[in-house]
Amino acid sequence: MSIQFEVMHKDIAGRVGRLTVGDKRIRTPALLPVVNPHIQIISPAEMAAMGIEGLITNAYIFSKSADFREEALSRGLHSVLGFDGLIMTDSGSFQLSVYGSVDTTNETTISFQRDIGSDIWVPLDIPTHPDSPRETVEADLSVTMSRLREAKEIFGDDAPLAGPVQGGLHPDLREQAGRETSELGFAFCPIGAVVPLLEGYRYKELVRSVISAKKGLSSAACVHLFGAGHPSMFALAVAMGCDIFDSAAYALYAREGRYITPSGTLKLAEIAELPCACSVCRSHTADELRSAPDKERLLAYHNLAVTQAEISRIRLSIQEGTLWDLVDERCRSHPRLLEGYRELLKHAHLLERSDRATKRRFFYRGDESCKRTEVIKFQEMIPRIRLSKRSLILCGGPQPQEFEEVLELRPPFGAVPTELSETAPMGQSEVPEWDDAMLESAFAGVDALLSANPDTEVTFSATPDLVDLIRKRFPAHKVIS
Ligand SMILES: [Zn+2]
């Protein structure tokens, strides 16, 4: 019953894939709603009707519950929860992070998860708070790694075990943890202890942690961002290569009267309209929802529906090759998300290696677009362009006949030989009137072209408004207009 992960479509480092464990199969990216057996505000059967293919519950709660322990051991988890999709169980590590200790061992919790028929079992890893000193992070990581090794030794290579990746905010430790987890043969890897980063809107540090873990992990691993449940950051996380999310947010936010949207959270007490098309929002006005006797349940339903819809939107955008557009849109909904997006763009050279070759479109959406993988992919190819003796770079100016070779300035990419101008990504690109950022990005591409062809006599042909700028930027070259 080993864990299999297949990738069908890619965009940036995001994937649309298929996670299979035994006879259970889910499409990824996927959301696993958190189900607390004691408080089933939305029942697993209702979740299945909403299109949810997998969920996560806490084995530790089952093991310590007089009501549920024996029932789960005798009937199995799927029967107790009334859900025949994929069920992942957490080990008690969450309780460990909250209460500081748990009354179980690594072997006991994994055996219990196996015995109740869970599909994915999590060892008792140590979720170290990200702000802990390095010595603590190192010591905890060493315990986590020894428990992962122990789990493999006791339960075997085919056991459906998750391999959590810890390492706090230290890029080297996260990368090392990722590498060792993959070397141990774990195919399903949750990135752990990021909840304090999510709660503190520390998206820049989140991006660094995930990117570091991903550097160490095998590209074939299915990656779960443990504890991430707000849809506004899913696109950013998927772009880094996260495949699975779990959400308790739908229920926790409902308890606090908070209405989730893909771009943030609203207070139900303050809103005049319900900007959503789910069955709750179509059948209630904001006033009716506020005064409904089962308000919390209805709000939880909406929160889950809107979260699930974002997952579908992300899967679609990966298949279409438009994930950058969605990341850009979502990350503009909060300045801290924008910081995370800008941090992600700093790693675009790395992301470029996993990105697909062709996409549906390149829509310029502002300065950040200059740093996207498509621009980097083209600019990395520039040194291979060989120019003949006399070349002309058209920047909107006239095209005299005497040049052997004509290139076109295509911001933000660079100077593109005319025979390449309709190929990807230039052929799919749409840019507004040229701005300073996209011109500077294109000029950097021209710099690379000029240094790769030092013996070529390059002339620029510019519109009158660009002549001075180009003369200043490329003083050694002739500019005609
Ligand atoms: Zn709704």
Image (cartoon, rainbow, N blue to C red):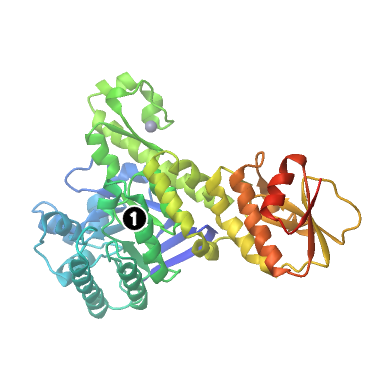
**Dot 1: within a 10 Å radius of its alpha carbon, few (fewer than 14), some, or many (20 or more) residues?**
many
Q: Nearer the viewer, residue 150 or 145?
A: 145
- For the view shown, which residue lies furthest in the right direction? 401
Say whether residue 70 is left or right of residue 416.
left
Residue at 30% over, 41% down: 250
Q: Which quadrant of the picture is home to ligand 1? A: top left
- Under mark 1, the amino acid is Glu
Residue at 73% over, 67% down: 385
Quadrant that contains the N terminus: bottom left
Quadrant that contains the C terminus: top right
Q: Is 209 above or below relative to 146? A: above
Question: Could you tell me residue 480's position as x and y percent?
Answer: 81, 49
Say whether residue 301 is left or right of residue 27.
left
Instruction: For residue 29, say whether it is visible.
Output: no
Instruction: For residue 119, say whether it is visible.
Output: yes
Question: Could you tell me residue 12's position as x and y percent?
Answer: 52, 57
Question: Could you tell me residue 431's position as x and y percent?
Answer: 65, 43
- The verdict on label 1 being within 8 Å of ligand 1 is no
Q: Nearer the viewer, residue 24 or 442?
A: 442
Residue at 11% over, 51% down: 67
Disc 1 on helix, strand or loop? helix
Residue 213 location, quadrant: bottom left
Residue for badge 1: 205
